[in-house]
Amino acid sequence: MPQMGVSVAEGTLVEWRKQRGDWVQADETICEISTDKIDTEVPSPASGRLIEVLVQVGATVDVGTTLARIATDARPGEPHSSEDERPSRAGHAARAAAAADAGSPPAPIAVPEGGPRAVGGRMSRRYSPVVQRIADEHGVDLDDVEGSGRDGRVQKKDVMAYVQARGGRRAQPPDEPAMHIESPYRAGAGASLSGPYVAPEGRPLSRMRRSIGQHMKHSLQTAATCTTWIEVDVSRVEIARKQLGITALPLIARCTIGALVEYPLLNAWLEGETHTVHEQVNLGIAVSLGEDGLIVPVVRGAQDLSPEGLARRIRDLARRARARQLSPDDVRGTTFTITNPGQFGSMMATPVIAQPQVAILDVEAIIKRPVVVTDAFGEDAIAIRPMVILGLSWDHRALDGALAARFLANVKKRVESYEA
């Protein structure tokens, strides 16, 4: 089970594209998996024959669990050895014996003559959670989608092709809920406070919330986290973003990347007592998934991208993240992260570092307010300027406060002197 994001600890196997005994090519899809954040296809790591399936459809297993075994010394066209089937037969016999001991042998299932039962003139079909989720998001009736998988099974690519063919329209919710005309409540009625207090029923955390919580707690217990803030005038960035037709985030990200190149000790990992400084900036951008949590896809080689290129990559990653279409490679290898809660109106935060990185930059809301500025003649004046607070959480095991402050000052200088 591949690692698909720092806060993803387990995944569910939703479909096997290959069966035991099938020949597979390297990088050919062998199964489909689903997590709270990503639905993806798992490619074969090598060419060979699939000799053993270790995880069944519907099972949820931890990251790192072996899903199947491939014999790489096999050759295409060779007969499948009966030795490979013994574990399966033995397992089947053991399950049958266990069922007999329990007094409840499995009953045979009668299949009507002519194959599976048709419902409403269509063949009844089962769909993977991935396919069902995408169909629900886009308002697709899966009976209208022609499947390309085994026995006509509808796969993710079939649904996406269908959505693209019809123009990518999503199902639109109603503008506002209908009024409940028969509501028993009346204006001014007030609620009775005389009844006994009934405590709300608790519910367990979702897998994603548990996983995020575990990783954040691990980070706070591992890193010597400090946070430094700086206030920045983004007047020039506001002018540039309007000229380029993009948001302020890619421009601030571009300035941050420039500072990382100048201060590479922040573009690094700290694993135990090993401090690894990276030449390439693999920039993580935190993407909110609403109540489902968040995920941090990565822009690889961000130092080579223009602001417009960064904007395109960030938009694409955010869109695919919310559509659960990221691949495992889209969430691996981040060297520095930017989080942008300011888009929701917040003014200050202390972000938690994603291990094993050594720093994370927090971008807050851009707010116009009066500030003291100095004119060309050295005179002070009050002016209205768009201002933002940038917060840098950094690991004191790898860095000192002076370096963190110099890095932030460098970002500030680049933002305030930005030229499109």
Image (cartoon, rainbow, N blue to C red):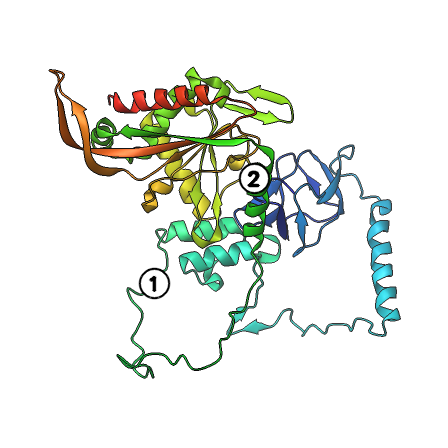
**Residue 236 at what x, y percent from top left?**
22, 26
> For residue 233, which quarter of the picture?
top left
The answer to which of 253 and 88 lies nearer the viewer is 253
Of residues 9 and 55, the one drawn nearer to the viewer in this rendering: 9
Q: Name the residue under label 2.
A: 6
Q: Is residue 142 left or right of residue 248?
A: right
Whether residue 305 is visible here, answered yes or no, is no
> 214 or 36, which is in the foreground?
214
Whether residue 114 can be seen here:
yes
Mark 2: secondary structure: loop
Of the 4 image quadrants, the one containing the C terminus is top left
The residue under label 2 is which amino acid type? Val
Q: Check disc 1 and report the residue beneath it.
A: 173
Side of 101 where 308 appears, left or right? left
**Residue at 64 percent of width and 51 percent of height:** 13
- Where does residue 329 sit, x and y in percent of width and height? 54, 35
Q: In which quarter of the image is residue 245?
A: top left
